């Protein structure tokens, strides 16, 4: 019997995006019920590696002329910087592909095939 080939990066990415959409629908239901958004002191949902469940990452936010820079600190060390421009995620300090989807005020950000972040407008932009 021959072992199966491992899934491709495209297959992994497709499954991860489907998971992100499902989480977004759950998050929008919570947002619509007037439950307050989590405080930045609690961190944000994040994952660094393929197949890793979401965990919490600490963040700090700097605002300048309507734009924001969110610095995410991984639980195991290191940081990722995410830029917001005109109220939307705009890029990061990584050379890997940057993409995002929005559900209500929740930004689901993916960098490369493995990094995932969920950042609300309230945290990134200071909006209520």
Image (cartoon, grey):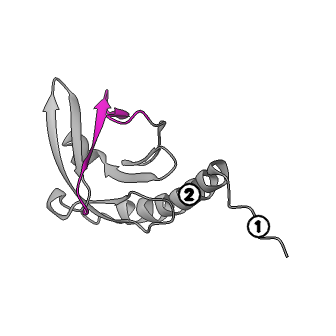
Q: Where is 91 relative to 30, above or below?
A: above
- Spot occupied by residue 9 in the image (x, y as percentages of width and height): 62, 50
Give the number of the disc on residue 16: 2
- In the foreground, 22 or 70: 70
85 in magenta: yes
The boundaries of the magenta stretch are 75-95
Q: Where is 100 relative to 76, above or below?
A: above
Looking at the image, which residue is at 29% across and 34% down?
83
Image quadrant occupied by the N terminus: bottom right
SS for dot 2: helix
- Spot occupied by residue 106 in the image (x, y as percentages of width and height): 38, 50
Whichever of callouts 1 and 2 sits on the residue coming sooner in the sequence is: 1
Residue occupied by mark 1:
4
Q: Are marks 1 and 2 in contact (CB under 8 Å)?
A: no
- In the foreground, 105 or 15: 15
- Count of numbered labels shown in the rendering: 2
Looking at the image, which residue is at 50% across and 60% down?
50
Is 1 displayed left or right of 38 in the figure? right
Looking at the image, which residue is at 46% across and 65% down?
26
Visible residue check, residue 126: yes
Looking at the image, which residue is at 54% across and 56% down?
21
Give the number of the disc on residue 29: none
């Amino acid at each position: 019997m021959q072992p199966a080939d491992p899934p491709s990066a495209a297959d992994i990415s497709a499954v991860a995006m489907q998971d992100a959409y499902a989480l977004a629908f759950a998050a929008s239901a919570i947002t619509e019920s007037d439950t307050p958004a989590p405080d930045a002191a609690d961190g944000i949902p994040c994952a660094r590696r393929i197949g890793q469940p979401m965990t919490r990452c600490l963040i700090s936010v700097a605002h300048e002329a309507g734009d924001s820079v969110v610095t995410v600190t991984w639980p195991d060390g290191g940081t990722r910087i995410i830029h917001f421009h005109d109220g939307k995620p705009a890029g990061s300090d990584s050379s890997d592909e940057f993409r995002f989807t929005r559900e209500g005020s929740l930004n689901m950000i993916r960098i490369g095939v493995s990094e995932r972040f969920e950042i609300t407008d309230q945290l990134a932009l200071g909006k209520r």
